[in-house]
Image: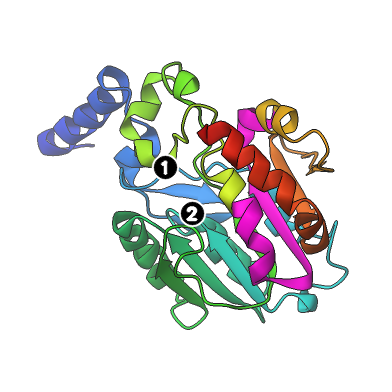
Amino acid sequence: VLTMDERLKVLDLYEQRIEESKPAAYITHEAWFAGLSFYVDERVLIPRSPIAELIEQQFAFWFDEPEQVNNILDMCTGSGCIAIACAYAFEQAQVDASDISADALAVAEINRANHGLEQRVQLIESDLFTDIPQKAYELIICNPPYVSEAEMQQLPAEFEHEPASALTAGKTGMDFVLPVLIEAPEYMSDDGLLVVEVGYSQPALENLLPEVPFFWIDFEHGGQGVFALSALQLGEHREAFRRALAEIRA
């Protein structure tokens, strides 16, 4: 039996969810990703990326053995869920987790401590690659802002509670994706892999770069808009990425 104080607290939670359209994860401060529990609040996006499925499979579509992966970069880490899940999936790897937001990194620090991964997951405040160490990463994962200005106006009310800076990416939704494509090969091993989520901006990216052989990943458990490119492919199409970036900035 609940006390009166407990009943009032429960009613307050219902009010936040129903009247304010506040996502349940922000009310309970817990979200699950790749079978792991994470602390979340309104400083970070709620974990929901289909990349979780790839992590659980240890990116088997590219790597024959998980031991091939020693250095991982999770860019735009937010809560740190992708970086931390990767640390579990690749037990021998060192993981760098970067974000431009100090607030987001504070949440990632909570999660890193909760999972006892202070020695294996390094948190880096960086604007994309600006302050990333010059390593040869076998795997770079990036879930950047990719929502266009028009799409931002159409998002459900729940998204109003999430940090806009982690969602919006200019008029086309490509403001962050293209710089990542340009710079990534400088930070990858020769046989490295880049995995990027662009969600519903997939058609816009394909229209902008029809000559690029994006490998769009099919998910068993739902999800779309995630592509992979090798370090070699990124190098081969670098000029196309530069032209596309100049085009959207014109």
* Residue holding disc 2: 76
Q: Mark 2 vs mark 1: which is more N-terminal?
A: 2
* Magenta stretch in the rendered image: 180-202
* Residue holding disc 1: 166
Few, some or many C-alpha atoms within 10 Å of disc 2 (few <14, some 14-19, many ≥20)? many
Few, some or many C-alpha atoms within 10 Å of disc 1 (few <14, some 14-19, many ≥20)? many
Residue drawn at the location 26% of the way across and 18% of the way down:
19
As for residue 218 lying within the magenta part, the answer is no
Q: Are marks 2 and 1 in contact (CB under 8 Å)?
A: yes
Residue type at tag 2: Cys
Residue 34 makes an appearance in the image: no
| Side of 208 relative to 73 (left or right) | right
Q: Nearer the viewer, residue 82 or 76?
A: 76
Query: Which element is circle 1 on?
Result: helix
> CA separation, marks 2 and 1?
8 Å
Q: Image height check: is 14 above or below 71?
A: above
As for residue 197 lying within the magenta part, the answer is yes
Query: Which element is circle 2 on?
Result: loop
